Image (spheres, coloured by chain):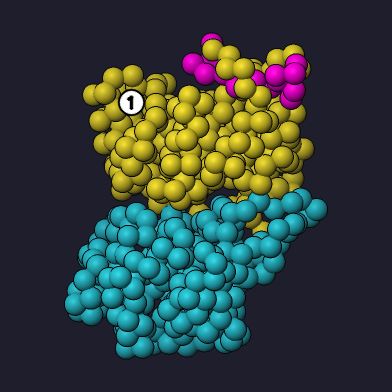
Amino acid sequence: MIAIVDYRAGNLTSVARALRSLNVPCVITDRADELRRADRVIFPGVGAAGEAMRNLRDSGLDGCIREIAESGKPLLGICLGTQIIFETSEEDDRTACLGIIPGGVKRFPGGLKEKDVPLKIPHMGWNRVQFRGKHPLFEGIPGNAEFYFVHSYYPAPSEDSSIVGETEYGIRFASVVSRGSLVAVQFHPEKSGRFGLRILENFSRWEGSHAQ
Amino acid sequence: MLSKRIIPCLDVRDGKLTKGIKFKGNIDIGDPVEVARRYYEQGADEIVFYDITASSEGRDIMIDVVKRVAETIFIPFSVGGGIRTLEDMRSVILAGAEKVSVNSGAVENPKIISEGAVAFGCQCIVLGMDVKNVEKSAKIPSGYEIVIQGGRKYMGIDALWWAREAENLGAGEICLNSIDADGTQEGYELELTHLITTNVKIPVIASGGAGKKEDLLNVLTKAKADAALIASIVHYGTYTIAELKEYLSGNDVKVREIW
């Protein structure tokens, strides 16, 4: 059973629908005991870091997520879930986050360009991920596959070793990071077509061991 | 580097497509869920649904369509048409749409944009703009005026001013439809598209007028649109989405090539 963390950060049903289409059992829950009992945990989210952290703290789930990340249980961060796994976010006047991966989350700077064309913020649409090495979660994903992104802030890990994949949008940023049994992606696998579903399917079988 | 998006648009009335859609092989289909699935499999980057139903019974049918679409395709899709209140937005988003599009509802009550952005996030809120070319005046300095009711009612609002205003109110994206070009299949309104997309910082989807593959190339390069909405050009089987993408890719436009 996969548990999807409900901390009132946007609509979580799309992740559940994607898992159901793969016949992977899942539950959306805000209960720590259910999260602890699950085989795997998905930590999604859409919205702003400040309110998300407030909701996590108010419900006491912040400690539970940290505990799961340390326990060796497979944990997948998605979008805002990925961002608040870091120590701090520039969003909402420097939000203190969960601190599971060293580093911060920064806002895309103004004036970014690609081929002399000014770039829009948010970074919204399909983009590639250049993987640095092999990871079981991305097995079967071709190098030119693209994923759906929507975000104005990007992960900036302080340790190079946490970076699994990078994406170009005016700058090069870490779009996939990992630490032990935690993998966190900035894009939305549940909205990234066949290759996104493949990542969720890989996650549903992953035991948390990994080789890089 | 971000890909330019190719977005088919489906008009739905009482739960059915308003026109049957012919895929190559001449299969005529009227079920929006089935057609969405076909376009998803053919490489659509996103899908736009417009509900042109008038009755409230029809609206419930549309919510059911949205739910079924959300279980069938795993790319973003938006739903627009008759969205006027936060409750309208909520029901569409909870049914599984990634984005909700407001058009005349926002012209009549601009606050719906900011309220929607606060409640669901900017990325959810698409401003649909229907625009007509008019003579430049003090009131309409850009020469492009906002219209509603399919172009029958002129609103006295400048399109460029409205695009910037919507951005400030928290819209995450603009779907810019030229009423003059719509349905002509003679190409997008390039000047209008360029004007809007270079003057806002949010993405702009160009809409209205696609008939040839060159039209897409022009609007994505010369007019700098972030995405191109297409209808007849794929509905009638002139091209598949894959053929359009192959052509664009061959002309140095970055598109999503595998799916």
Q: Is residue B19 above or below residue A43?
A: above
State which quadrant residue B134 falls in.
top right
| Residue B185 in sight | no
* Image coordinates for residue A156, horizontal then vertical, percent: 59, 75
State which quadrant residue A180 falls in.
bottom left
* Residue at the image position 70 percent from the left and 48 percent from the top: B253
Mark 1 lies on a secondary structure that is strand
Residue B22 lies in the magenta stretch: no
Say which amino acid is labelled 1: Lys
Q: Is residue A16 above or below residue A31?
A: above
Kindly give the residue lying farthest to the top in the view shown. B152
* Horizontal side, residue B27 vs residue B65: left or right: right
* Horizontal side, residue B214 vs residue B53: left or right: right
Q: Which residue is mark 1?
A: B16
Assess disc 1: are there few (<14), some (14-19) or many (≥20) residues with their C-alpha within 10 Å of its C-alpha.
Answer: many
* Image coordinates for residue A93, horizontal then vertical, percent: 55, 67
* Residue at the image position 51 percent from the left and 26 percent from the top: B107
Question: Which quadrant holds the N terminus of chain A?
Answer: bottom left
* Residue at the image position 53 percent from the left and 44 percent from the top: B170
Label 1 resides on the chain identified as B
* Image coordinates for residue A145, horizontal then vertical, percent: 55, 61
Nearest to the observer: residue A56 or residue A141: A56
Q: Colour of chain A?
A: cyan
Q: Which chain is yellow?
A: B
Please provide the residue range marked out in magenta: B137-152
Nearest to the observer: residue A49 or residue A33: A49
Residue B151 lies in the magenta stretch: yes
* Horizontal side, residue A112 vs residue A18: left or right: right
* Image coordinates for residue B39, horizontal then vertical, percent: 46, 40
| Labels in figure, total | 1
* Horizontal side, residue B184 vs residue B81: left or right: right
Nearest to the observer: residue B193 or residue B32: B193
